[in-house]
Amino acid sequence: MTFDRELDVALAAAREAMGVIMHVYARDFEVHYKDAREPVTEADRLANELICGRLAAAFPSDGIVAEESAPSDPAQLASALARERVWLVDPLDGTKEFVGRYDEFSVMIGLCVAGTPVVGVVAMPVQDVVAIGAQDTGAWSIDASGARRALRVSSKRSVGESSMLMSRSHRSERLLAVATALAPAQQVLSGSVGIKCVRIASGTDELYVNLPSRRGARLWDACGPEAIVRAAGGRVSTVFGEPIAYQGPEVGLVRGMVATNGAIHDEVVATTQALCG
């Protein structure tokens, strides 16, 4: 099965959202807070509305769970995630970077079919670059001119020679302890889960770890990026090595996330499992 139409629609929606986001980014904007830790801006809300509208019009039978419009009722959320086909959308991943004007934020759209990510789009507005990936299709980077470049993970086979991506704004003591235990060749700071995973898919870096939490990353942070990493030859799992449970019932990445070039995945998981178990 191919997902060419799904990829085309998601790509077009992401490009439109990039324009909306950059329009807000170019001027002064207000910052509100969903809670003490999570900022939200007009760009988040406008991009969320645009993307969900485009997906709903093109695929009216599909479920859509997006960060700024996810059902607040746990039963409704669980029901939405349990559907055969579900779009998971983060309209602006890296809002803290957006607010701080670090230029490291992205639009992330992913499609899960029977709980497996099969389509992913990560659009980087400042760079005007979009990464796409689909099951049985491969992964690609598309620049502002429309030129495409195939993405493929690196061939490094040990963590000791690899580059580990670390969050610019969410580096806990627990994560620093995991990084110390893994002992990669270098650590690289980056905003946005999507950007980190695109760097892995493109072979620039080799691994990223997001620790288990009910208050941190969500399924919409993982779905699109996972589809791209997998399409580029990499692997994604929880920190315990099993597939991420996209069909719920919880929206949080309660068992964490590990994304790698594939060759070092088992080595990374052996460490994360031991430290998080």
Image: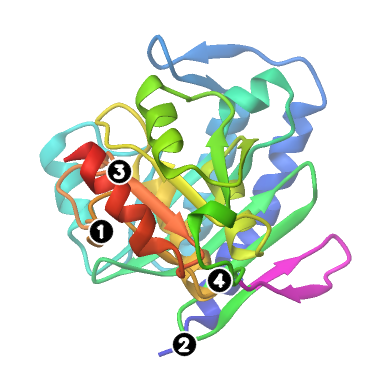
Mark with earlier residue (1, 2): 2
Circle 3 or circle 4, nearest the eye: 3
Q: Contact (CB < 8 A) between labels 3 and 1?
A: no
How busy is the neighbourhood of tag 4: few (under 14 within 10 Å), some, or many (20 plus)? many
Give the residue furthest to the left: 75
The residue lying at 60 percent from left, 47 percent from top is 185
What residue is shown with label 4? Answer: 133
On residue 2, which mark appears? 2
**What's the amino acid at mark 1?**
Gly
Along the viewing direction, whichever of 117 and 14 lies nearer the viewer: 117
Asked whether 146 falls inside the magenta stretch, the response is: yes
Residue 82 point in image, percent of width and height: 17, 59
Along the viewing direction, whichever of 48 and 206 lies nearer the viewer: 206
Q: Contact (CB < 8 A) between labels 1 and 2?
A: no
**What's the amino acid at mark 3?**
Gly
What residue is shown with label 1? Answer: 241
Distance between the Cα atoms at labels 3 and 1? 10 Å
Circle 1 or circle 4, nearest the eye: 1
Distance between the Cα atoms at labels 2 and 3? 29 Å
What residue is shown with label 3? Answer: 256
